[in-house]
Each structure stands twice: as structure tokens, then as C-alpha cells.
Image: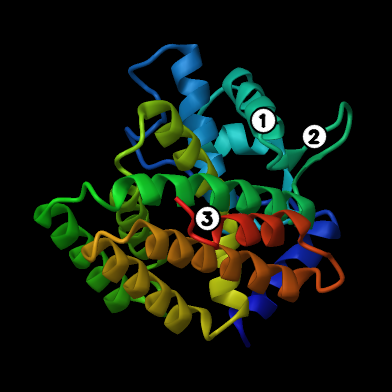
Amino acid sequence: MSRRSDMAEGQQSAESGSAAQVPSEPPGGTPGQAGGGRRLALDVHGRLRDMILSGELLPGSVLLQAEMARNLGVSRTPMREAFRLLQEEGLIDAQPDQRARVRAVDPEDLDGVYGARIMLETLAVSMTAKSLAAGDLERMGVALKRMQELAGNDQLDEWHAAHKEFHRIATQAVGPHLQRMLASLGEHSERYIRLAQLGVPSSWARARTDHEALLEALRLSDPDEAARAIARHLARTALNVLADIAPEYEPVATRTALGIAGNGQT
């Protein structure tokens, strides 16, 4: 049975009302133990957020505050704050007097995230293309090799760490405010990247080719080609996932951004 089928079965089970199970913390591992209440809530939020973005908590999974607080070894207060933050990010739906659930994948959200990411990341890559040192390119090469070694196996977290490093270096010339925006969009995109990896077997090979094309453009200090390479790469991921989960949806934001940024005009 494919991992896609496993995900579908997990979602059906969640919709029938079964609560998501969160593994208990090991002894001494209570999140935010040394911090105050706010720090504890942020730690709990970070853990649950990672579980949603990684697919460990499937779309539709029921989230019970009391049960999760007990499993994580925290009180209901930081758990309520963590739920509030997750709802603000659009990762869960939580209404008064109703069970919270992991939000289903929203085609409009995916389209908007990738439309914004294409525009901002092409800008950042274009600015970075002529400023990368030999050491930067070498680190990108190491990250790309690591991604190739891990592609298709069960070490998805390690693959995503190398992938994040690759994109971080490729966009490093921009200022801290834009860096934060890129990081936020990148984290939000991770959920969709994992869906592409599960639903489109050829995505691993295509991603490798796309990343190699971007690295080569950066080695040549060619901002126009680098912009085209990153725009095509990001759009391909978004369009593949949308074709798989919502083939009827018209991705206006992604296609518009690709038309603008993919021309490589700097």
C-alpha cells in the first residue's frame, strides 16, 4: 500500500472522530522546562506545528487539548495558547465547544503561498547571484549532494534540512526582514513539498534537475537564469500538488507569478 493511501486512510479515521495520538515526552524532556509560561506555550506550539507540517498529524485529525496536554506533560494553559497560535496560522480549525481538527489542505492557500514565494524568492536569488563566494557555492553543492543521497528514503527530516540550507544560501543576499518572510513561506511550503513527494513519484528526480539548474546559474553569476530556474522549480511543486489534490482548481496566483518572475528580467 502506498504512503498516499496510508494518508487517506488516516484522514478517514480522523473524520470518524478518533483523536490524534501524540507520543509522550521522555523523562526530563518536558518542552520549555526552563522557561516561563509563554516559552512553554511556544515550545508546545512548535512541536505540534512540526507534526502537522511533516504529515505526522494528518489533515482532519482530531486534536483534544486535554489528551495532548497529558501526553506532553503540560497543563491546559500552554496547550490552549498553542492551539490559538496554530489557528492563527491556519493550520487547525478550532471553534468554541467543538473539537479542533488539523485543517485540510486548502488549494487557495497553496496557490497563494507559492505565488508569494515565487515573487520573493526570484527577487532574492537574483540579488544573490552575483555575490556568492566559492565557499557558498561549495556549501550549496554539499547540501545538494546530501539531498540526492536522501531522496526517496525514510529520512525526510534530514532531506528537508539539507533542502532548507540549499535555499537559504541561494537567497542570502537579502536583508533580515525579507529573510524572515522567506523563512516563513518556506516553512509553510514544507507541508506541500511532502505531499508532492508522496503523490508524485517523479518529483524526486525533477527536484534534483531543478536544483542542479539553479546551482549552475549561480555558479555562472547569471541572475536572469537563476530567477527562471527558481521560478520554474517552485511553480512545478505547486502545480504538481494541485493537480493531485484539486485538479479542478485554477492556480491563478502561481501562474501569474511564474509569468512575471519566470521572464528573468532584472
Q: Amino acid at mark 1?
A: Phe
- Mark with earlier residue (2, 3): 2
Could you tell me which residue is drawn at 52 percent across and 26 percent down?
A: 74
- Mark with earlier residue (3, 1): 1
Q: Is residue 222 above or below residue 31?
A: below
Q: Which residue is mark 3?
A: 190
**Gap in Å between the C-alphas at discs 3 and 1?**
20 Å
Q: Which mark is residue 83?
A: 1
Toward the left, the furthest residue is 135
Q: Amino acid at mark 3?
A: Glu
Residue 161 position within the rendered picture, expressed as x and y whole percent measured from the top left: 34, 56
Residue 31 position within the rendered picture, expressed as x and y whole percent measured from the top left: 41, 30
As rendered, which of 194 and 116 lies closer to the eye? 116
Q: Residues within 10 Å of mark 2 (few under 14, many from 20)?
A: some
Left or right of 85 on screen, residue 242: right
Say if mark 2 contacts mark 1, CB within 8 Å.
yes
Could you tell me which residue is drawn at 23 percent across and 73 percent down?
A: 145
Q: Residues within 10 Å of mark 1 (few under 14, many from 20)?
A: many
Q: Amino acid at mark 2?
A: Ala
Q: Quadrant of residue 101?
A: top right
- Mark with earlier residue (2, 1): 1
Toward the top, the furthest residue is 36
Could you tell me which residue is drawn at 49 percent across and 25 percent down?
A: 42
As rendered, which of 114 and 13 lies closer to the eye? 114
Q: Which mark is residue 94?
A: 2
From the viewer's perspective, is the residue at label 3 or at label 1 nearer?
A: 3
Q: Quadrant of residue 192?
A: bottom right
Is residue 22 visible to the viewer in this orientation of the structure? no
Q: Secondary structure at mark 3?
A: helix
